Image (tube, rainbow, N blue to C red):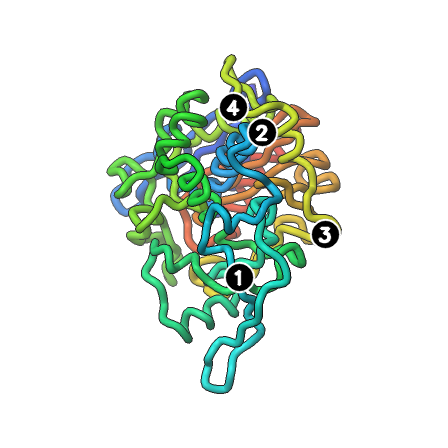
Amino acid sequence: MIDDTPLETAIAQGKLPGAVAMLSTREGETYARAFGMADATTGRPMAVDTPFQIASMTKAIVSVGVMHLVERGALSLDAPIGTVLPDLADNRVLTGFAADGTPQLRPASRPITLRHLLTHTAGLGYAFVQPEVLCFYQATGMPAPGSRRGITMPLLFDPGEQWAYSVATDWIGLAIEAATGSSLGVYLAEHVFQPLGMDETGFLRALPDNAARVHVRNPEGGLGTIPMFLGGGEFESGGGGLISTAPDYTRFVRMILRGGELDGARVLKTETVDEMSRNQVAPLKAGAVGTSMPEFATAFDPFPEQHSGWGLGFLINPDQGRDGRSPGSLSWAGIFNSYYWIDPKADVAGVFMAQMAPFADAGALGAYAALEQMAYA
């Protein structure tokens, strides 16, 4: 039996309204517990299967989905993606702004590929991360939330030259739709969710009544909720639109831990998972994310002391993690303070889900670290 007192203490000390934590090995779940409330304003309790907006934890799932198409030869990692997505065919790089605020642009030196999109080296960005993107939209008109225009922007650099966290996985979702003629949600349901038994995961038009609410800390130290919902836009967001549960996501990370298979259902070939788990961006350093909207997301670098890499959909820490994970482990997070890691070497994976804004909340990070320490104790 796992002693989870340190995790319980960390959640209390971090003043989180609620959370769900799970651990798993290749053979199955080893720990699952819900803490606190799904809605602090009503007192509704958290359950292990409470739905969450998993935000950018969607990216790993969509990356798996597109690699299924690469296996079948329906998409290529290194061909120009503009043949599939004409909006990405003739890219221009933002070089600055004129005195009147007009964006200054030049042609990109090479085309964007699917590999660039999967590794966040395409040159795209996020308005809440890079000030240049926010300035571009302020100069040309702010896009509506969830609109396709909100992922349409000039490049910040030539493809392959730098690493920058971005809307790239939204474009991967659109590439899946273009290559299959299916909606992203229907495609993922057939090729990922149904084979893995992820029955509570999908793109929804509204937040379910039983879902955890997004919480914020008020100046007096209490908690309130905000009506923030990342779905329901013009397209199903491959970069952050899924609703899921901790048990469902744990099944997904177990599949990666097992090399692409779970309970007899093979989603990817083992060699494909191996390729996704290999650092694709050396000598670039990956993982550090800035902010231009600190009320939405604070700056974050999960391993500032390491020269982290990026695979085809995952952050990769090259050295031993401070809280226990092995070199070569895979991880990432969602903007409402949900997190996961996958450690094939030690045969352990962890999922921690909370719903707090802004991202990188100190209390949530402390609890996530406590879960990881607990897993390796």
Residue type at tag 1: Asn
Front label number (1 vs 4): 1
What whole-number distance in Å separates the C-alpha atoms at marks 1 and 4?
A: 33 Å
Residue type at tag 4: Val
Residue type at tag 2: Ala
Q: Look at 51% across and 34% down and name the residue there.
A: 74
Q: Which residue is mark 4?
A: 267
Q: Which residue is mark 3?
A: 305
Q: Look at 51% across and 51% down and name the residue there.
A: 82
Residue 91's disc number: 1
Residue type at tag 3: Glu
276, 308: nearer the viewer: 276
What element does badge 4 sit on?
loop
Mark 2: few, some, or many residues within 10 Å (few <14, many ≥20)? many
What whole-number distance in Å separates the C-alpha atoms at marks 4 and 2?
A: 18 Å
Q: Earlier in the sequence, mark 1 or mark 3?
A: 1
Residue 349's disc number: 2
